Image (cartoon, rainbow, N blue to C red):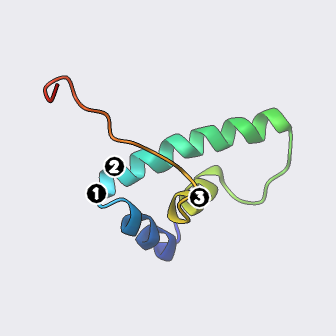
Amino acid sequence: MDVKLMEQMLDRINNRYEGIMVVSKEAARVNTIIRLSGEEVDEKPTTIALRRVAEGKVKFKYEKSKEEE
């Protein structure tokens, strides 16, 4: 995994665990798009997702837990 991309991601998302959760959900989405399109891609979906999160192209929000409501 690219350390520079990871640092950029952490600049946008303060918590490493939450950042990994956002990247993993984006990677699943990217993987589905790649499979459905039948396109050949040189990079892994995880790398593509990490770059997208680091560049601020992925929107996410925090949901309140039931305890906070």
| Spot occupied by residue 29 in the image (x, y as percentages of width and height) | 62, 38
Disc 2 residue crowd, few under 14, some 14–19, many 20+, Cα 10 Å: few
SS under mark 2: helix
Q: Residue flagged by tag 3: what amino acid is it? A: Arg
Q: Residue at x 50, y 48 (%)?
A: 59
Mark toward the start of the polypeptide (3 vs 2): 2
The answer to whether marks 1 and 2 mark residues whose Cβ atoms lie closer than 8 Å is yes
Q: Residue furthest left?
A: 67
SS under mark 3: helix
Q: Is residue 52 left or right of residue 42?
A: left
The residue singled out by tag 3 in the image is 52
Badge number at residue 18: 2
| Spot occupied by residue 55 in the image (x, y as percentages of width and height) | 56, 65
The residue singled out by tag 1 in the image is 15
Q: Report which quarter residue 39 is drawn in.
A: top right
CA–CA distance in space, label 1 to label 3: 17 Å
Residue 58, compared with residue 25, is above or below; it is below
Q: Is residue 62 left or right of residue 9?
A: left
| Spot occupied by residue 41 in the image (x, y as percentages of width and height) | 79, 54
Residue nearest the observer in this picture, 9 or 3: 9
Residue nearest the observer in this picture, 30 or 66: 66
